Amino acid sequence: FGYFAGPLVTEISPAFGPSVGGTSLRVVGSDLSGTSVLCTIGNTTTPAAVVSSSLVRCVTPAHQPGPVSVGIERDGAAATTQMFMYQEVVTVTAVRPSMGPERGGTDVDVIGTGFKNTPMLACRFGAKDVAPAVWLTPSLAKCIAPPLPVGNLTVEVSNNGLDWSMSGALYRTRSEFSLHSIVPNATHSRTTPLVTVRGAGLTGPTGQLTLMFNASVVN
């Protein structure tokens, strides 16, 4: 006959994730390892990956938005539970501006749905370049583009730093530009001549390439 202390759950992270499920949970506690270890998430039981006697990993199933309890069942003994909040799925529909230099630094407004004001709110440019985001409204967040490779990338948003939207808007990174010559380089103040500008990296989508002459902007 053997006596085993009951499992104890003291923390889960992240504490929230999307209603589609798929969030990888870290369940921390004590006496969590055993012959048979399961996660109970709401009314659903899922397999648990035992990392150690104090750490178990679980993957959340799909569930409607709202709170559920998360616990561990070890060899038939149930652990204390912590709360997990299912949230609506995050979507991204547009970014403004939709283009910026490869060196980064562009303030990008990200438009979508389901944005939450959390410390983990972030934007991801492409597959791996992540930047912190500032929450403005549930449908608007702002982030600063990091240095990026030249080309087209999608922008996604995460509320918890782990689960990302899957509907990203297109963001184009352009190469750095430079001006080599302007012809003519002088004109009478009462005329508006056609000016030819030569340089590098001056290509861009129609309506997004502009020149500034003193305080006047010209498309």
Image (spheres, rainbow, N blue to C red):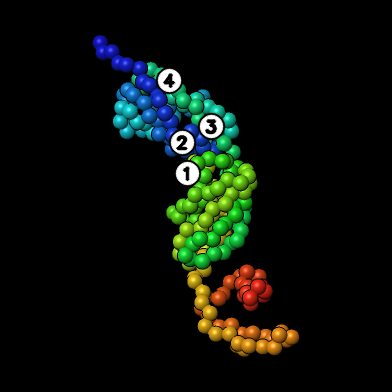
Along the polypeptide, which appears first: circle 1 or circle 2? Answer: 2
Q: Give the amino acid type for the residue marked by disc 1 in the picture.
A: Gly
Disc 3 to disc 4, how far (Cα)?
Answer: 17 Å
Numbered label attached to residue 80: 4
Q: Residue furthest left?
A: 1
**Residue bearing mark 3:** 85
Residue depicted at x 46% and y 52%: 130
* Residue 93 x %, y %: 62, 52
Q: Helix, strand, or loop for circle 1?
A: loop
Q: In this view, does 60 lie to the left or right of 206?
A: left
Residue depicted at x 58% and y 72%: 204
For the residues bearing labels 4 and 2, Cβ distance under 8 angstroms: no
For the residues bearing labels 1 and 2, Cβ distance under 8 angstroms: yes
Q: In this view, does 77 lie to the left or right of 44?
A: left
**Residue bearing mark 2:** 14
**Residue bearing mark 1:** 161
Q: Give the amino acid type for the residue marked by disc 3 in the picture.
A: Met
* Residue 146 can be seen, yes or no: yes
Foreground of the two, 188 or 79: 188
Q: Helix, strand, or loop for circle 3?
A: strand
